[in-house]
Image (tube, grey):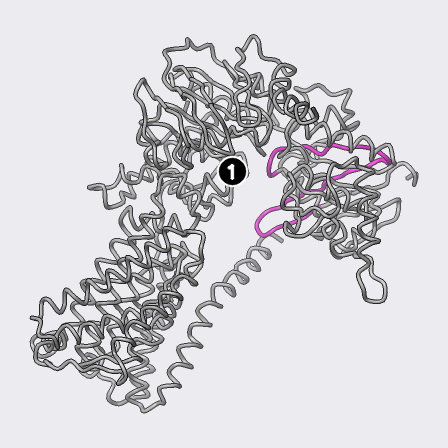
């Protein structure tokens, strides 16, 4: 019963360089280059070797950009992750200080993050009608509360056996920090899963239209649960590496990280309303913000000023698609008239 | 031009949207106190035309005369002030507000800066009485049925002293009984001197109400006809641009063995003790009033909701369906009623919509999406149902209702393990040309030996396409009629039997 009208539908997708450049990711790559030129102009010490040396400080947050992209694509949000960083960082110190061997320290930290993720995921999937902004606000307060209670009156804990955690902050071949390699490997895995697998497609389906996805046989709650668990796990990776670089944790550890991570994702083109954006965009955006911070730091720009710049970038990122839409509409109108 | 004959006249209206001419030199004349039908396929320009009349869109070319005087509306408020009001298919009400508040939204009665609630409630009651409405001004809109919400919208139109009321697909979401009620109201308004334009895909509406009908096709004016002088076939030809020889191509299929059976399924508050069966090659209708529980039964079969009790058999095997994926794996495919919120992801391309349910089957190693295979397959099925689209990457939102429904059908066809297809209101809001095509596909599926369940409120398609019809009322199956036994009266009786009995019991 093939098409009575004999109409043929095109199934070839033409990808041109021009088209690629006009995607958000294309624009980010251009911006990435511009930011590097800008950085070299404002700071004499902005060299490849120096960037490589300073980057690890900021890179721990990148762990969280990856699963946060999943959660935003789902149309959810998780604002408890900063607290999970604090809680897992604190726990890491306590476990080590109690005399545990290093593998147990790492496992303990990751297990704690996993449990936090399971808690968030269980709440989100057991009560799917509740807004995730509110449920994770609840766990944000609880997780940080637990961390603060265990930190006690002093409000901080030191990682006594610094030699033990050193391997995480070393450099391979004296140039490439371990954290860069770990982030790179995990980022590739997360990106491949989101963009190329059925699980990734399901996340986009849910974020675009939860009901249609459910009717089409997508296991909506299972996908959401997995995303929250991955989020908790990656927050503990962040906590672990942060501890490795600061040799301790305190009540302000990870504070505000959730918003910075969400900002990187949104700047990367991942809409907080769900179903849009790619992890490639999120990672480039994260890198742009990181590099800006490094250069501005080198140029002795006040760290609060960096926040202002990041905020401005974020608003521009959200505005541009709207402006582009207006221009397209005007072009079409002119073409029709 | 005699001033008295036409209350509204539009000449040479052209409206351009980015990239398309939505209206091309169209004409329209509305007589005083006339009910005038406006018909055409989806995308013919009817809705745009209505929006020009109501001042939502400004036309690029053309003239509009109201009672002989040329008018230029700068916005909907101008049209309202001039006495033109529109009632849309999906009432644009404020669900948490009362009937009174909805009626007077935007033109509240205010004295000295204070809203005059008593006066407004009294006026609202007056309007509701005039329409013989069975609800109160203080009722919350969200708790009312679609028909009652529509009545509120009509009351709202009357509250502005509208001389011209436009009804946009008023009966699309109504049951047979509710439609009757609407006909009564339209008749009454016409007798009171109101002029009415209505858009509908249902021929029944036109024959019942209108004296004249204007047809648009592809943004163009085709003609205006007297309803009692034009034949059905001519009208369809005017609308579609070609002849449709057989609207309901019900094939002669040898009915096979029983393939599907529900036994005593119940879900508290929705349906009780439902049993039915389907044979291979059989088209089984499920009808009844909206809210009778038809959709709910099928949702439970497909794992969307959980029934409290009951058994489901497919090919003699009892099924355990916990989620939609389970039903699909067994070969039960549901085409949900609401295309835009349940059937499709509108922001996605057509191809990805078609392959979403089978992405795991197509994926390399069950994990990595196989774009090439997906594109080939979706192209094949989208062409098979003759979707009007340029590429498989067109977003689903860019298609008309009928074509969106075809994508939903293609999505079902792509699932090659299909044994039973459940179509929930497959032709709702679909124009006559696409309707015929969907019936043809249904016939093809029956020929291939699939079992088909069609949930529908439209009597002609139930009578035209089904081998057997189950009628539901208040969550129970009240009867099952063979093709030979089925008639409009018998179905209507069965779909109300239960409720009228209950009402009598309550009265006693």
Vertical arrangement, residue A74 with respect to residue A172, above or below: above
Looking at the picture, how far across and down is residue B368, in whole percent? 24, 46
Which residue is most to the front?
Answer: B508
User: What chain does badge 1 belong to?
Assistant: B
Looking at the picture, how far across and down is residue A141, in whole percent? 37, 70
Q: How many marks?
A: 1
Please tell me in which quadrant of the rendered image residue B117 appears: bottom right
Q: Main secondary structure of the magenta part?
A: strand
Which residue is most to the bottom?
Answer: A300
Residue, x 43% and y 42% (percent of image)?
A: A212
Residue, x 37% and y 14% (percent of image)?
A: B258
Q: Is residue A292 left or right of residue A107?
A: right
Please tell me in which quadrant of the rendered image residue A43 appears: bottom left
Looking at the picture, how far across and down is residue A237, in whole percent? 21, 68
Which span of residues is magenta-colored? Answer: B14-43
The residue closer to the viewer here, B334 or B350, is B334
Q: Is residue B35 left or right of residue B485?
A: right
Q: Is residue B178 left or right of residue A321?
A: right
Vertical arrangement, residue A224 with respect to residue B206, above or below: below
Looking at the picture, how far across and down is residue B125, in whole percent? 81, 44
Quarter holding the N terminus of chain A is: top left
Residue, x 27% and y 43% (percent of image)?
A: B370
Query: What residue is disc 1 on?
Result: B338
Q: Is residue B231 left or right of residue B114?
A: left
Residue, x 29% and y 48% (percent of image)?
A: A199
Q: Secondary structure at mark 1?
A: loop
């Amino acid at each position: 019963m093939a098409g009575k009208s004999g109409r043929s539908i095109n199934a070839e997708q033409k990808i041109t360089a021009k088209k690629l450049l006009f995607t958000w990711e294309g624009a980010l790559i251009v911006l990435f280059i511009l930011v590097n030129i800008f950085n070299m102009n404002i700071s004499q010490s902005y060299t490849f070797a120096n960037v490589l040396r300073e980057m690890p400080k900021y890179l721990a947050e990148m762990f969280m950009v990856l699963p946060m992209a999943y959660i935003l694509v789902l149309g959810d949000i998780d604002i408890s992750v900063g607290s999970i960083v604090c809680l897992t960082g604190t726990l890491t110190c306590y476990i080590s200080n109690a005399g545990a061997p290093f593998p147990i320290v790492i496992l303990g930290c990751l297990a704690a993050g996993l449990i936090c993720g399971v808690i968030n995921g269980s709440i989100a999937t057991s009560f799917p009608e509740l807004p995730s902004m509110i449920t994770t606000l609840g766990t944000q307060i609880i997780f940080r509360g637990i961390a603060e209670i265990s930190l006690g009156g002093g409000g901080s804990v030191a990682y006594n056996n610094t030699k033990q955690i050193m391997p995480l902050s070393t450099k391979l071949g004296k140039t490439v920090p371990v954290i860069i390699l770990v982030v790179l490997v995990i980022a590739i895995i997360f990106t491949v899963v989101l963009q190329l697998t059925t699980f990734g497609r399901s996340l986009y389906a849910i974020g675009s239209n939860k009901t249609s996805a459910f009717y089409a046989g997508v296991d909506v709650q299972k996908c959401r649960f997995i995303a929250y668990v991955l989020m908790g796990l990656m927050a503990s990776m962040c906590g672990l590496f942060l501890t490795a670089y600061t040799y301790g944790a305190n009540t302000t550890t990870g504070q505000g990280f959730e918003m910075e991570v969400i900002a990187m994702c949104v700047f990367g083109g991942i809409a907080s309303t769900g179903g849009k954006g790619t992890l490639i965009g999120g990672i480039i955006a994260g890198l742009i913000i990181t590099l800006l911070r490094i250069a501005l730091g080198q140029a002795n720009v006040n760290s609060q000023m960096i926040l202002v710049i990041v905020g401005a970038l974020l608003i521009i990122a959200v505005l541009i698609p709207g402006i582009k839409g207006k221009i397209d509409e005007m072009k079409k109108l002119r073409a029709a008239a | 031009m005699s001033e008295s004959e036409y209350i509204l006249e539009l000449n040479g209206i052209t409206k351009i949207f980015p990239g398309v001419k939505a209206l091309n030199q169209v004409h329209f004349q509305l007589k005083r106190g006339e009910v005038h039908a406006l018909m055409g396929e989806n995308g013919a320009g009817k809705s745009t035309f209505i929006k020009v009349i109501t001042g939502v869109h400004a036309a690029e070319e053309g003239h509009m005369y109201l009672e002989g005087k040329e008018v230029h509306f700068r916005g909907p408020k101008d049209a309202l002030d001039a006495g033109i009001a529109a009632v849309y298919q999906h009432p644009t009400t404020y669900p948490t507000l009362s009937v009174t508040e909805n009626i007077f939204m935007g033109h509240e009665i205010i004295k000295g800066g204070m809203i005059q609630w008593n006066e407004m409630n009294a006026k609202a009651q007056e309007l509701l009485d005039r329409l013989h409405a069975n609800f109160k001004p203080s009722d919350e809109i969200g708790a009312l049925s679609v028909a009652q919400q529509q009545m509120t919208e009509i009351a709202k139109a009357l509250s502005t002293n509208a001389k011209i009321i436009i009804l946009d697909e008023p009966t699309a979401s109504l049951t047979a009984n509710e439609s009757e009620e609407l006909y009564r109201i339209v008749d009454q308004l016409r007798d009171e001197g109101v002029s009415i334009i209505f858009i509908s895909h249902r021929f029944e509406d036109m024959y019942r109400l209108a004296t004249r009908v204007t047809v648009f096709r592809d943004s163009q004016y085709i003609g205006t006809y007297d309803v009692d002088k034009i034949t059905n076939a001519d009208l369809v030809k005017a609308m579609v641009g070609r002849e449709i020889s057989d609207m309901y191509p019900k094939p002669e299929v040898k009915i096979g063995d029983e393939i599907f059976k529900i036994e005593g399924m119940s879900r508290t508050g929705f349906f009780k003790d439902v049993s039915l069966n389907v044979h291979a090659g059989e088209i089984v209708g499920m009808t009844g009033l909206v809210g009778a529980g038809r959709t709910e039964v099928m949702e439970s079969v497909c794992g969307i909701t959980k029934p409290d009790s009951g058994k489901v058999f497919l090919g003699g095997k009892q099924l355990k369906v916990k989620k939609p994926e389970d039903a699909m794996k067994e070969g039960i495919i549901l085409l949900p009623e609401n295309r835009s919120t349940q059937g499709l992801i509108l922001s996605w391309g057509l191809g990805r919509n078609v392959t979403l349910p089978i992405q795991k089957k197509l994926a390399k190693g069950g994990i990595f999406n196989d774009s090439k295979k997906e594109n080939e397959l979706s192209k094949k099925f989208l062409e098979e149902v003759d979707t009007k689209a340029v590429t498989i990457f067109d977003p689903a939102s860019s298609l008309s209702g009928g074509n969106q429904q075809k994508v939903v059908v293609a999505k079902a066809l792509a699932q090659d393990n299909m044994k039973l297809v459940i179509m929930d209101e497959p032709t709702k809001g679909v124009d006559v040309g696409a309707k015929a095509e969907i019936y043809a596909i249904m016939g093809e599926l029956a020929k291939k030996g699939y079992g088909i369940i069609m949930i529908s409120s439209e009597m002609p398609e139930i009578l035209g396409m089904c081998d057997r019809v189950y009628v539901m009322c208040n969550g129970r199956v009240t009867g099952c009629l063979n093709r030979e036994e089925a008639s409009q009266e018998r179905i209507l009786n069965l779909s109300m039997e239960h409720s009228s009995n209950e009402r009598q019991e309550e009265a006693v």
